[in-house]
């Protein structure tokens, strides 16, 4: 586990994790506006004194919750993605995990409704780390897309756009969770697709040969026979 904010020497990492889990449950139950440290201590099953030894105030606690939840999410996604070898399958697994995480995370669902400002601020602060994690997962796949191969964009730029797209899908979720992941997967497929020929290309145009009508053979008209009068012999006298 990475370094834990708020964990001083002599404190137990398991107790800290227990407090953070309890804080997530308390947020899902009470929201942020009415959340007190006593709610967290009760949910975590620790005394208020123990809670304050690990986190001196609510702000420090909530910052630690945001960091810890992000680390847990990307650790689970990375483990699932590394089990897949094919490019699109990796993208699909990552999107399925992201969608499931958002839908099933009760605290996130509560904050989306009651505390969107807090979520936006948290996403803004953590954006560099989120982008770096997604870039690490997707960079090998994005380098194989047509925009990168054609020099239109870099893999880093596509990773940045994909991250923003995913955050937008998180903040404005679809009515059906599967629509969110399938929409992002469709975007990835479009990036990998070969460009279609456009009207402005220099390919040789196909010219249709005009159909030559078959020659009409007109039967020559036979002129009517000219009836020449036979010479009249003079009558013998």
Image (cartoon, rainbow, N blue to C red):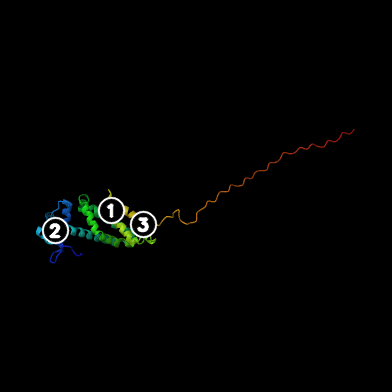
Q: Which residue is mark 1?
A: 168
Camera-side mark, 2 or 3: 2
- Give the image location of residue 218, x and y in percent: 65, 43
Q: Earlier in the sequence, mark 2 or mark 1?
A: 2
Residue 58: image quadrant is bottom left
Give the number of callouts.
Answer: 3
Q: Which residue is mark 3?
A: 191
Residue 9: image quadrant is bottom left
| Farthest-out residue, top | 237
Return the residue nearer the eye: 93 or 41.
41
- Give the image location of residue 73, x and y in percent: 23, 58
On the rendered image, what quadrant is the C terminus found in?
top right
On the rendered image, what quadrant is the N terminus found in?
bottom left
Q: CA distance from mark 1 to mark 3?
A: 19 Å
| Farthest-out residue, right | 237
- Residue 57: mark in rendering: 2
């Amino acid at each position: 586990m990475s370094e834990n904010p708020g964990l001083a020497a002599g404190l137990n990492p398991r107790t800290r994790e227990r407090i953070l889990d309890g804080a997530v449950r308390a947020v899902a139950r009470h929201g942020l506006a009415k959340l007190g440290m006593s709610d967290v201590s009760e949910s975590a099953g620790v005394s208020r004194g123990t809670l304050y030894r690990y986190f001196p105030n609510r702000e420090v606690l909530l910052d630690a919750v945001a960091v810890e939840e992000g680390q847990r999410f990307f650790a689970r996604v990375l483990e699932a993605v590394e089990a897949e070898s094919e490019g699109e399958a990796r993208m699909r697994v990552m999107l399925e995990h992201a969608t499931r995480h958002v839908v099933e995370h009760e605290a996130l669902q509560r904050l989306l409704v009651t505390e969107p400002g807090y979520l936006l601020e948290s996403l803004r602060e953590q954006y560099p780390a989120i982008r770096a994690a997604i870039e690490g997962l997707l960079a090998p796949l994005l380098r194989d897309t047509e925009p990168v191969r054609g020099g239109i964009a870099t893999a880093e730029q596509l990773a940045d756009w994909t991250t923003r797209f995913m955050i937008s899908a998180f903040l404005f979720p679809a009515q059906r969770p599967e629509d969110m992941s399938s929409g992002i997967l469709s975007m990835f497929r479009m990036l990998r697709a070969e460009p279609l020929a456009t009207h402005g290309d220099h390919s040789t145009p196909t010219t249709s040969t005009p159909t030559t009508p078959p020659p009409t053979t007109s039967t020559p008209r036979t002129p009517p026979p000219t009836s020449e009068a036979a010479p009249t012999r003079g009558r013998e006298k």
